[in-house]
Each structure stands twice: as C-alpha cells, then as structure tokens.
Amino acid sequence: MKNKLLIIFAIFLSFNCYSQIIFEKGYYINNLDEKIECLIKNVQWYNNPNKFTHKLTDDANEKETTINEVKEFGIYNASKYIRSTVNIDRSSEGITNLTTQKDPIFTNETLFLNVILEGKATLFFFKEDIVEKYFYKKENSTIEQLINKNYLTPNNYIAKNEKYLIQLWNDLKCPDLTMKMIEKIKYTSDDLTNFFTKYNQCNNSQTTIFDKKKSWDLFKLTVRPGINSSSLSIININNANSYTIDFKNQISVRLGIEAEIVLPFNKNKWSIVLEPTYIYYNSKVNYVVNGNSREASVDYKAIEFPLGIRHYFFLNNDSKILINGFLVPEFNFSSTIKFSDNSDVLDIDVSSAFALGIGYKFKNKYSIEYRYTTNKNLLSRYDGKPEAKFMNSSLIFGYTFF
C-alpha cells in the first residue's frame, strides 16, 4: 500500500493539470495605447512578472507577451500591473545581506509594478525573491519608491532608514492625518493600504483596491473526524526465546482539528498544515514462546501533530484535489505494552513518522482524504528489546468552519 501511494503521489506532482490555473477575463494595453480584451492566465505571480500568457478567446491559441510589448495588463476583479521605468533600490532586509550604506543605491529599471490601490494617491508593489519594495505616486506625478532600508552601523548594529515616513508626511498631507499617526505606519501592505485609503477619502477621491484578500482569508480551521485502520506486530529475535506477536487489525475513530495557512501566491495552490489528532489502539492477544502460551496487551493513546505541506489541483471553481506530505511527531499518554511471562511493563516511546495523503475538497468546505502513515516502532527507546511495528491508515472527513 505504501508503494502504491508513493506512485500516486508522484503521478500527481508530475501531472501538468491545465485546469489548475484558469484563464480569466482581462485586458492589456499595447504600445499604441489600444486596449485589447482577452483571457489572461492567472498564475497569481509570486514575483512581479515581466511577461504573461493570454489568448483572445477560449478556443484561440495561447500567446506569451513581454513587458516590451504592453504598457499595462490586468485581470478584472483580481490584479493590475503597469509598466514603468523607475529608480529602484534593490537592497535586501536580510541580516546577512546588510551593508554600511544608509542611503539607497538606485538603478534605473523598467518593471511591471503591481497596483495595490488606485486613487488620488496610488500605491504599487514590487517583489523579486527576497526584495520587496513599495512605490507611490500622487495624481500626475512620477512614481517614486518609498524608502525603507536596514543597514549596519560602524559598531555592527542594525539601523533603519525609514525615509518613507517623511515621504508620506511631506507628499500626502491631510488635516485628518497627523504625524503621530504616520509614525506608527509599518512598511507593510496592510498599513500602507490603510494610510493611502484614508488619504484618498480625506481628499474625496474614490479608491480602488485590487488585492482585497485579507490575511484571515488565508487561514482556515477544519474539523477532521475519521476512521483509522491500525495493526501492531512485535518481533523479538534477540535471544533464545524468539517470538512474533501479531495483534489484530482494529478499526477505530480518530478526531483532529486542522489549522491551514494558505500561501498567498501561485493561485493559492500551496499551504502549510498542522493537524493535532487523537488516536488510540488497545488489544490483547495470546502468543507462543518455546511451546508455551503467553499473553501480551497494548494500551496506546497519543496525540499526533502532523505538520506538512499541501498542494491543490483545481478541477473547477468548486472542486479540487489535494495532496499532503507530513512529518508526524506525537505525544503519548503513559502508553504501555505488557507481557504476562515476566514483570516487564514497557513504556511506549515513538520516533516521528511520515505520512502521505490524497483527497478531494468541495466548495472549500467539505473534504475527504485517504492517508497512509509510515510504520512506527513503539519501543524505539529500548536497545535489545522487541521491535513493535505499528501500521496505520486513515479515511478522514473534513468540514471547514472558518
């Protein structure tokens, strides 16, 4: 079963499912200022693109268009990019990349800037790997970068050049916006969007926000009840009294709650998942050692903490396939294995396992998943003791309530 699941997992990862990323209604403006209605492949770019794929109709051939060919493109109710030649400081905020240069070092580049908010004052964003910069313009002025730069002092302390606060105060004045308010603005999309919205409202300007997704839209909670199929075998070959104990396969109920953080790029196809889950397994069997009948019992109760990555394959607006890969550490509750032929009571101690799952989700609320967990040795803490191989697979149901 493990090998079969691995094969399925590999097939899905290598499958270039055209319906994962759909073409959506949009437009582009060419160098002749002609606005062309089209369908644009919405890949929800992680980095700002320098090209995009589009087609004029559903049945038309796809075409890749570069930044040199268009002034602007957008997907209705989703995103907007404009071509602009700007001065950009590409300094990184990462500690290992800091320099002693306080002032920005600009290069002149032609980029597609992501329009976050549009109005009397407009806010733009540019991202390329670890470089993240915000730009702005007021009415018909040129586009400028909002300066925020970390640098090292001569004593190797980290200092900040937060010139963007001065830029906001000098260029976007309004009686309702005080210096005290501006000093609290962080160099983040949420804070800057809120400020630009207030500025436009103060100037009776309509504001259009293109990326309306809030941070809590990317966090989901799901109740995950299900059924476990579990078995346990104990093998002892370390002394003259070798034996094998085959505990019976058991069907039991599992109960978990899943916290999912959807990563805000690549069309929300990737997420990080944590699913605390209660499991239990109790059994008692007879076994034979040197012709003598003995009894063994196991009492295993634990909370697993599967932590891993999920990938979605979108089938349509309501349906998607999901694939999970987890590391599965756990905490058990005084679980033991007992043998009747001596006074040994062995405490269960389990090393982390791995799990793979494949499932289906409908309307972002209802889900079903089959999951296989690699074998665990319940007696991993002991040297020279029997090996207790625990095997588990699960059928999991889900209801997303938040």
Image (cartoon, rainbow, N blue to C red):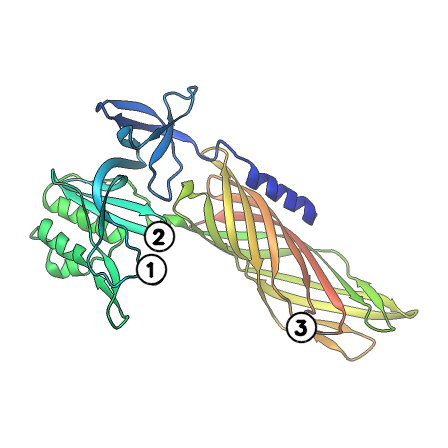
- Residue 114 lies in quadrant: top left
The reply to whether dot 2 and dot 1 touch (C-beta < 8 Å) is: yes
Q: Residues within 10 Å of mark 1 (few under 14, many from 20)?
A: few
Q: Position of residue 180 (x, y in %)?
A: 13, 61
Q: Position of residue 82 (x, y in %)?
A: 25, 35
Residue lying farthest right? 291
- Residue 32 lies in quadrant: top left
Residue shown at the point (53%, 60%) measured from the top left: 276
Q: Residues within 10 Å of mark 3 (few under 14, many from 20)?
A: some
Residue shown at the point (51%, 48%) measured from the top left: 310
Residue underneath mark 3: 381
State the SS at label 3.
loop
Depth check: 77 or 26 in front? 26
Residue shown at the point (59%, 48%) measured from the top left: 357
Residue underneath mark 2: 130
Residue 39 circle label: none
Residue 97 circle label: 1
Q: How many marks?
A: 3
Depth check: 67 or 183 in front? 67
Q: Amino acid at mark 3?
A: Arg
Q: Is residue 90 above or below residue 33?
A: below
318 relative to 172 in the view: left or right: right
State the SS at label 1.
helix
For marks 1 and 3, the one nearer the N-term is 1
- Residue 348 lies in quadrant: bottom right
Q: Residues within 10 Å of mark 2 (few under 14, many from 20)?
A: few
For marks 3 and 2, the one nearer the N-term is 2
Between marks 2 and 1, how big is the CA–CA gap?
11 Å
Between marks 1 and 3, how big is the CA–CA gap?
43 Å
